Image (cartoon, grey):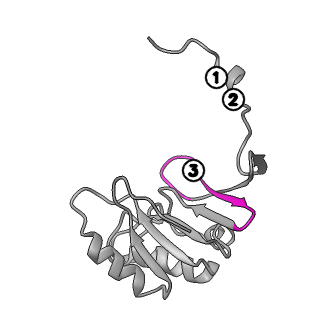
Amino acid sequence: MEPTEDLLEVFDVHSLPTSHPVGPFQLDAALLPHHVPHAGVRLTAPGLTVAYSGDAGPDPALARLAAGADLFIAGTTLQGDSADGGDGQLMSAVDAGIWATRSGAKRLLLTHFWPGSDRTRSTADARSSFSGEVIAAEESMVLSF
């Protein structure tokens, strides 16, 4: 049976991008390029900042979103340089590494791989443009800080 509650009665809905406290976190959002309306998010708590691009294209807003983040989680759908077929709506691992470097992020977690993508290649691609730790997401992965 499906829930019958009106979601507007259950959740406090806010338009993005803005800044909102969420429990112990400060949530900031930025509109990012994609095929449909899309926002990346930044969660900050005392001693920890995590930024997530979602499935977005490369954009200067990523530098602000991931500025100094302990972990930048980036959707890296494409392999190789985005110029090799990207339309500005999706990022490659090279792009993610570039934006991790520009933002001063400490760690980069690659995610949102196409089925059959070579995660080893994506990790190597990201390392070509980012000198920090690069991790390829895996199902059930747990990271420690």
For mark 1, what is the residue? 7
Image coords of residue 90 (percent x, y): 44, 62
Label 1, label 3: how many angstroms apart (C-alpha)? 20 Å
Residue situated in front as seen by the camera: 11 or 54: 11
Image coords of residue 47 (percent x, y): 71, 68
Viewer-nearest of discs 1 and 3:
1
Q: Secondary structure at mark 1?
A: helix
Q: Secondary structure at mark 2?
A: loop
Residue 37 sits inside the magenta stretch: yes
> What are the residue bounds of the magenta stretch?
33-47
* Residue plotted at (49% across, 73% down): 108
* Residue plotted at (74% across, 45% down): 23
* Residue plotted at (50% across, 84% down): 132
| Dots 2, 3 in contact, CB < 8 A | no
- Tell me the quarter of the image containing the N terminus: top left
What amino acid is labelled 3 in the image?
His
Which residue ends up furthest to the left in the rendered image? 116
Number of residues whose C-alpha sits closer than 10 Å to that of mark 2, classed few (under 14), some (14–19) or many (20 or more): few
Residue situated in front as seen by the camera: 66 or 91: 66
| Dots 1, 2 in contact, CB < 8 A | yes
For mark 3, what is the residue? 38
Q: Secondary structure at mark 3?
A: loop
**Vertical position of residue 82 compared to residue 75: above or below:** below
Give the label on residue 11, or none: 2
